[in-house]
């Protein structure tokens, strides 16, 4: 009988993490902050174009059921809630997230975006993401570990007394032609007698002018770097296109 951890048909991985540009409501809604016309209406109209669509994803990817959406499987305190767009993007003229998508190997991806009237505010949002990670990093690591334990428990795997668990949160480089980026990886390594398991969540948040976008890529195992990179490039290209279409600031 195969070990339950070897079963490729597992629930989609957890996915939390610090972020950057993360997301909000459970299913792809958006909202606006206080901002005067006509910039705000233009931002609201353009922001869906800054998000991932199925056309941006490799073959075999599809939208995921809401109950398995990674953003619906985590619990953060209010000030650390990276899935609250108001926490991550205060002062944005428009902000929105995409549905979560799942790939053939149960990897998962979702995107979010925010448009600011002033480029300085967009830059401040990226800085605010780094501050969130500094202040809430331990909470994020604890929540990822909880999700990893739940994942294995759902597969009938008992960690027992001899499981070796290591949770890391590291900043990564983003080799992308954007104005500013921040990227992080949260990984849980669980050593159990006879098997080792990993949960990996990568988060990238980038700014192109007044448009900020974020990508969460989560997988049960090691990420497919080429696949993740292609998805990130598609998202960044969308941000650049949207930013070029924004009108001048009302101010």
Image (spheres, helix red, strand yellow):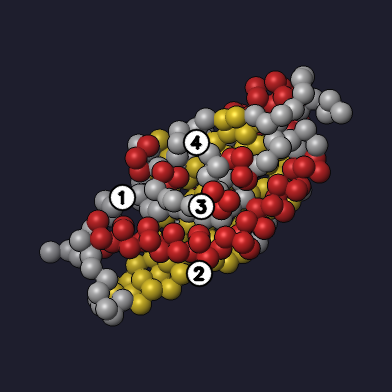
Q: CA distance from mark 3 to mark 2?
A: 20 Å
Report which residue position mark 2 lands on. Answer: 168
Q: Secondary structure at mark 3?
A: loop
Q: Which mark is residue 77?
A: 3
Q: Position of residue 151 (x, y in %)?
A: 31, 57
Report which residue position mark 1 lands on. Answer: 11
Q: In the rendered image, which quarter is residue 143 located in?
A: bottom left
**Residue at 48% in and 57% down:** 201
Q: Position of residue 66 (x, y in %)?
A: 37, 37
Q: Secondary structure at mark 2?
A: strand
Marks 3, 1: nearer the viewer: 3
Q: Image height check: is 150 above or below 55?
A: below
Q: CA distance from mark 1 to mark 2?
A: 22 Å
Q: In the image as oriented, which residue stretches furthest toward the left?
A: 1
- Are dots 3 and 4 in contact, CB under 8 Å? no
Marks 3, 4: nearer the viewer: 3
Of labels 1 and 4, earlier in sequence is: 1
Q: CA distance from mark 3 to mark 1?
A: 25 Å
Marks 1, 4: nearer the viewer: 4
Task: Compare residues 152 and 56 and report the one nearer the observer.
Answer: 152
Q: Position of residue 30 (x, y in %)?
A: 57, 30
Q: Which mark is residue 25?
A: 4
Q: Quadrant of the N terminus?
A: bottom left
């Amino acid at each position: 009988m195969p070990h339950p951890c070897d079963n490729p048909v597992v629930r989609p991985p957890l996915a939390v993490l610090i972020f950057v540009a993360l997301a909000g409501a459970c299913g792809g809604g958006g909202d606006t902050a206080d901002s005067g016309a006509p910039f705000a209406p233009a931002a609201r109209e353009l922001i869906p174009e800054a998000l991932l669509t199925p056309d941006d994803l490799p073959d075999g990817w599809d939208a995921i059921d809401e109950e398995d959406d990674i953003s619906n499987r985590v619990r953060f305190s209010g000030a650390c809630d990276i899935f609250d767009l108001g926490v991550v993007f205060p002062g944005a003229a428009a902000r929105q997230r995409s549905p979560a998508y799942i790939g053939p190997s149960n990897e998962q991806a979702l995107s979010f975006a925010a448009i600011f009237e002033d480029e300085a505010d967009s830059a401040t949002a990226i800085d605010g993401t780094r501050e969130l990670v500094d202040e809430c990093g331990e909470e994020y690591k604890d929540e990822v570990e909880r999700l990893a334990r739940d994942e294995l428990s759902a597969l009938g795997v008992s960690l027992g007394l001899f499981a070796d668990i290591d949770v890391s949160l590291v900043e990564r480089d983003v080799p992308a032609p954007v104005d500013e980026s921040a990227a992080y990886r949260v990984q849980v390594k669980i050593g159990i007698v006879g098997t080792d398991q990993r949960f990996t969540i990568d988060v990238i948040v980038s700014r192109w002018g007044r448009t900020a976008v974020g990508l969460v890529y989560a997988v049960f195992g090691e990420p497919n770097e080429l696949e993740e990179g292609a998805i990130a490039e598609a998202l960044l290209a969308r941000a650049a296109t949207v930013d070029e279409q924004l009108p001048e600031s009302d101010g």
